[in-house]
Amino acid sequence: MAKLSEIVPVQPDGGTIWNDCVRLYHEAFPPWERESDHLLERRMAKGRYLMRAGLKNEQTVGFYVLDVEEDGQAYALLSYLAVAEAERGPGYGEQLTRHAIGLFLERRDRRWLLIEAEDRQARFYGRIGFVKFGFDYFVPRYGDAGAVPMHLMAVAEKGPLRSVSGGELKQIIERVYRDSYKLDAGDPRLAKQLALIPEEVPLLEWPPEALEQR
């Protein structure tokens, strides 16, 4: 595995690393999955978003954004992680992910580190140590009334668990939908998602063996 030279904090200061991360943000994520640059900058300025850039020989090759929300919340959210297309393969994405996990564990003020992942990404995160919540999950689209099926995955602050209370998870997901995606309480996507959460949610190692062999 190739090694990043360093992983450094990023501020929305108009500098080279910041501009590189913004460019990569636009290249890696479609419009429906991106927040506005203004909101990204505002949340970083308030300390809610922690951005880190991965450098190789002083060049930005990837970044991640950790949403630490407010004090007293049960979760942090790995909102964005991307590696430049030309730099994928040597393991930079894994290094950035493990760095994000380490930052989450250092804070000691959250129970869960969450991530929303498509199928291919979910296999990647599962191999690193994330587990999948055992229910159907949908990510609201920015800019319209749609939603996209994804896997909701997590690393637990206190180590491996077999299941989690559906009640606890409903509170977390309602917070994510309303705060991160700006859905109001009456949005049908929120009601539909909450109805899909069972009373006790299993935590599944991912990917299952059958998928791993494909």
Image (cartoon, grey):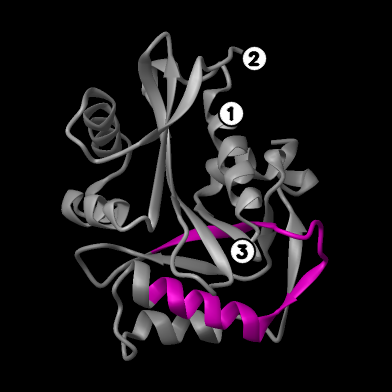
Which amino acid lies under the numbered mark 1 shown in the image of this protein?
A: Gln
**Residue 109's disc number:** 3
Task: Write the residue at 52% across / 68% down.
Answer: 137
Going by the numbered disc 3, the residue's amino acid type is Asp
Q: CA distance from mark 3 to mark 1?
A: 23 Å
x, y percent for residue 101: 62, 45
First of labels 3, 1 by sequence position: 1
Q: How busy is the neighbourhood of tag 2: few (under 14 within 10 Å), some, or many (20 plus)?
A: few
Q: Hey, which residue is sitting farthest bottom in the picture?
A: 186
Gap between marks 2 and 3 measured at Cα = 32 Å
Q: Residues within 10 Å of mark 1 (few under 14, many from 20)?
A: some
Left or right of 109 in this view: 191: left
Check contact, mark 1 vs mark 2: CB within 8 A: yes
Locate the C terminus and report the quarter of the image it occupies: top right
Element under label 1?
helix
The stretch drawn in magenta includes residue 194: no
Q: Which residues are magenta?
A: 148-177
Residue contact at pointers 3 and 1, CB within 8 angstroms: no
Q: Reply yes or no: does residue 161 show up in magenta.
A: yes
